[in-house]
Image: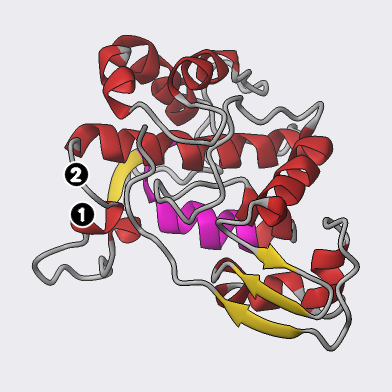
Amino acid sequence: MAGCKTQQEYSPADASPITHEAFTSLLQKHVDENGNVNYKGFQEDQKAFTQYLKKLSNHPPNDTWSREEKLAYWINAYNAFTVKLIVDHYPLESIQDLHPTIKIPTVSTVWHKKFFKIGGVETSLNEIEHEILRKKFDEPRIHFAINCASVSCAPLRSKAYTAANLDQELTTQAQNFLSDASKNNISKDRVVLSKIFRWFKGDFSENGSLIEYINQYTKTNIHPDAEIEYMEYNWSLNEQ
């Protein structure tokens, strides 16, 4: 359609990689050490938060950015727009309360709602997670970094992700997530895992078994034939 732009065609005046210090400032104020969020605090900091979201919207990655710059951008974008979604509808008990109540073409869950723009293109959280992060980066650790505003999700980090330290940040997130007994209970012969490992098993076992993948980030050496079970997923809001 004439006049429409894709993310690839969108060229803001400044196409260099953006920094995420503004998001870090907000996260340090409103996210505690357990990843619980003060959504009311984000509401009160609406001006600063909106400025950061506009920065994300107006500066999509392009081919001059490094892989780490792109990946950090998309993880931060997913987390920031998830927070926006909750803030816009707060108070609520669960992100699942925002599922469509009427049938809308191509919108079956809250994650399919196109409620923000990236580079002039209406975008959804589903597109960032599945069409960009999972499809283009081959990086299973994103599942420990993106947060779906729920108790059983990987916790929201109290700092934005950065290109310079991304590998260590993702490794630390993986280690912390697996060592959290409320999300994963691990022993040598039996593991009770987050359902994230069941839902996205293919991402974690592309180059080996699921146990082999998990063993990279745990102090316990899990036996290859260990019994695997999965925890119930708690979709309650991850609020303070």
Q: Secondary structure at mark 2?
A: loop
Vertical placement of residue 50 versus 5, above or below: above
Relative placement, left or right, of 122 versus 148 is left
Separation (CA) of disc 2 from disc 1: 9 Å
Task: Please report contact status of discs 2 and 1: CB closer than 8 Å, yes or no.
Answer: yes
Q: Is residue 31 visible?
A: yes
Asked if residue 131 lies in the magenta stretch, the reply is yes
Residue, x 26% and y 23% (percent of image)?
A: 40
Determine whether, in the image, residue 104 is placed left or right of residue 143.
left
Label 1 sits on what residue type? Leu
Q: Considering depth in this image, is 2 or 144 the residue closer to the camera? A: 144
**Can you give x and y, in whole percent of width and height, for residue 139 in the image?**
74, 57
- Residue 165 spot, x, y in % from top left: 81, 29
Q: Residue beneath label 2, please?
A: 92
Span of residues in magenta: 117-134
Viewer-proximal residue, 39 or 193?
193
Q: Residue at x 68, y 78 (%)?
A: 202
Residue 67 can be seen in this image = no
Disc 1: which residue: 98
Q: Position of residue 27 (x, y in %)?
A: 50, 22
The amino acid type found where label 2 is placed reads: Leu
Q: For mark 1, does the 10 Å Cα neighbourhood hold few (<14), some (14 to 19), or many (20 or more) residues? A: some
Point 68% across, 58% down: residue: 136
**Left or right: residue 171 compared with residue 159:** right
Which callout, 2 or 1, points at the residue further toward the start of the chain?
A: 2
Residue displayed at 61% across by 34% down: 73
